[in-house]
Amino acid sequence: MLADAQHLDNQDALKSMRAAFALPPGIIYLDGNSLGPLPIVARERALEVTAGQWGTDLITSWNKHQWIDLPIICGEQIAPIIGAGPDQVVCCDSISVNLFKVLSAALAMQGDRKKVITTEDNFPTDIYTVEGLQGQLGPDRCELIKVAEEDIEHSLDDSVAVLLVTQVNFRSGKMLDMQALTKAAHKKGIMVVWDLAHSAGAVPVELDAYYADFAVGCTYKYLNGGPGAPAFIYVAKRHQAHFQQPLSGWMGHAAPFAFDNRYVPAQSIRQNLSGTPPVLSMSVLNAALTLWADIDMAHVRAKSVALSEFFLAALKNLGLDDELRCIAPLIAGERGSQLAFRHAHSYAICQAWIDAGVIADFRAPDILRIGFAPLYLSFTDLWQACEKLKEVMEKKAYLGEKYQRKLAVT
Ligand SMILES: *Cc1c(COP(=O)(O)O)cnc(C)c1O
């Protein structure tokens, strides 16, 4: 299969993008769905923003280097990647904080309705955020209801205020139909909040075309913004006049530097800002996002599907497909840009594979997760990774003592 891999690499429309990343030699990185690798322009910007801007121009940099506009600038860079027109995306805080803002605002827009429906296997922070809001507003104004993914549609009726869904399941990789669910929810007067953590930069998303209401997402996964890079929030233009997020801070004020003691929200997406933006990480993100300027998401999707199909074929070719049970949908159109496998020793296998030079990740309780980031991964990488996995499995290297102890971050 090595020859097949090389052939696919030769035909790869995105192959020139690999050179834009500082990938450590000898490592195959299959975890770009958890922390994207370092783009070379981001490394350069980190130096420039510290030594050159902060170190030289000090506070004048807020104007001189447009620090004050970074949340908006980064938002506008993300917008085309998720199918959003201008003035609807801003970069700030984390997904968790942005969920709190958007869920509070959406509930307030829904009058007497109080139910928030989400999936029982959603990413925990999404569930915790609704629970926190329920604790604060009281059960009469916010009621969390968790349903199975396959029951979402049946659970939508006109007593529901908000549907909160993650498009691509972080464990299984299963992708929900954003257009169909948004439409079904709107028929019942329900507003939808989409979590795009595993979608932005991974699959084509068309927020405006699907008439989406709200979305949140992070930038440190497929968008390669760096560890803890700020998240984003999307509020459809048609909702902005009625939308009021509760973390009203000076950066979301119509005129922050008027230092007016009366809060007047900015009449724009900027209202979603609360405090001072983290300039260092946002500058690095701004640089990392320049990589996407000429990227066609259709190419990204086509390569993502081809990579994951190749990986499955390689596992089969090496006789590993029985032992590693794939829990991601086998139909490529039904999954995001990742695969997931069950094995009783997943954690130890992942650790032994890392020692062999291949970084994937483990998700409790027993899942080995493989992310396919089309900007820098090659088919040859995947073949080599599978050969190394075969060695780990055959020699049962993962049974070694040192692979059994779980580290703080898995
Ligand atoms: C990664 C991830 C998050 C992360 O949330 P933060 O608050 O930005 O740390 C949230 N939701 C989903 C679905 C994720 O995969």
Image (cartoon, rainbow, N blue to C red):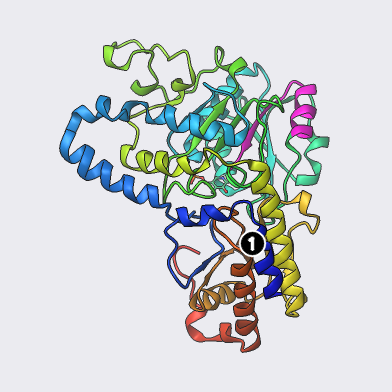
Above or below 352: residue 172: above
Q: Toward which corner of the image does residue 199 lie, by quadrant? A: top right
Residue 246 x/y as whole percent: 46, 23
Which residue is rendered at x = 36% and y = 23% of the image? 251
Which residue is rendered at x = 76% and y = 69% of the image? 313
Quarter of the image with the N terminus is bottom right
Can you see residue 58? Answer: yes
Name the residue tied to disc 1: 10
Can you see residue 167? Answer: no
Above or below 255: residue 322: below
Above or below 134: residue 257: above
Q: Which residues are magenta?
A: 179-196
Which residue is rendered at x = 61% and y = 69% of the image? 380
Which residue is rendered at x = 67% and y = 68% of the image? 5
Q: Toward which corner of the image does residue 316 lie, by quadrant? A: bottom right
Q: Toward which corner of the image does residue 106 lie, by quadrant? A: top right
For residue 180: magenta? Answer: yes
> Looking at this view, is 305 or 88 the one in front?
305
Residue 156 x/y as whole percent: 78, 31
Above or below 43: residue 310: below
> Which residue type does callout 1 highlight?
Asn
Disc 1 within 8 angstroms of ligand 1 (CB): no
| Mark 1 burial class by Cα count in 10 Å: few <14, some 14-19, many 20+ | few
Residue 409 x/y as whole percent: 46, 62
- Relative placement, left or right, of 148 versus 171 is right
